Amino acid sequence: MQHTCHDLVNLFNELFASTEQTVLVGGASEPLYRPSTPDELLHQVIFTHDYYASALHEIAHWCIAGKERRQLVDYGYWYKPDGRNLAEQILFEQVEVKPQAIEWHFSLAAGVNFNISLDNLAGETHSTSDFQQKVYQQAWLYFETGLPLRAEKFKNRLLEFYDRSAVYYQSLLGELA
């Protein structure tokens, strides 16, 4: 089955447009979360261009953002683009562990490859394996304790749409074992 961003937009919007007043929007040059305004009645999870992985990643961020954070542009988080120094990179990684662990679950549910991202090609990084281990541990914890509610709903919709329920846990155990 072909994986398209159009499918992700439809799946997300079917699940969350009316219940959470939130839609998934693609085609941007940079990802962004934009809360509703008097002129724009729905919150928007905006992903980069038409990149499938970008959509899954931005959905993962939205799935863990609390109600108060979902009222703030980009959930109120600090973000500095590529070119971060080591201290800035460590701060970046601290907020990326959970979203990337959820994105990993989404990728397995959809049957697409997942790649850890340090998102800092022109900056300083420390050990990629340290960050990868933290994401791995969080993904395993989610496997044992369950994903956050919105993430679980979306993961289950991906499993249904891509007909991967029978192989998801086998794939997950193969990746995380």
Image (tube, grey):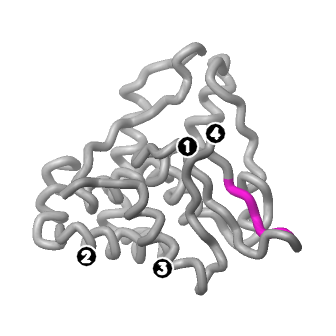
- Sequence-wise, the earlier of marks 3 and 1 is 3
Residue at horizontal 62 percent and vertical 38 percent from the top: 29
Q: Are marks 2 and 4 in contact (CB under 8 Å)?
A: no
Q: Position of residue 123 (x, y in %)?
A: 60, 15
Q: Are marks 2 and 3 in contact (CB under 8 Å)?
A: no
Q: Position of residue 120 (x, y in %)?
A: 55, 23
Q: Are marks 3 and 1 in contact (CB under 8 Å)?
A: no
Instruction: Give the residue type at disc 2.
Output: Glu
Residue of label 4: 30
Q: Is residue 69 above or below residue 152?
A: above
Mark 3 falls on what kind of element?
helix
* CA separation in Å, label 3 and label 1: 21 Å
Residue at horizontal 78 percent and vertical 53 percent from the top: 76
* CA separation in Å, label 2 and label 4: 29 Å
For the N terminus, which image quadrant?
bottom left
Residue of label 1: 48
* CA separation in Å, label 4 and label 1: 5 Å
Mark 4 nearby-residue class (10 Å; few <14, some 14–19, many ≥20): few
- Sequence-wise, the earlier of marks 4 and 1 is 4
Mark 4 falls on what kind of element?
loop
Q: Is residue 40 magenta?
A: no
- Sequence-wise, the earlier of marks 2 and 3 is 3
Residue of label 3: 15
Mark 1 falls on what kind of element?
strand
- Sequence-wise, the earlier of marks 4 and 3 is 3
Q: Is residue 36 magenta?
A: yes
Mark 1 nearby-residue class (10 Å; few <14, some 14–19, many ≥20): some
Magenta segment: 33-37
Residue at horizontal 79 percent and vertical 69 percent from the top: 40
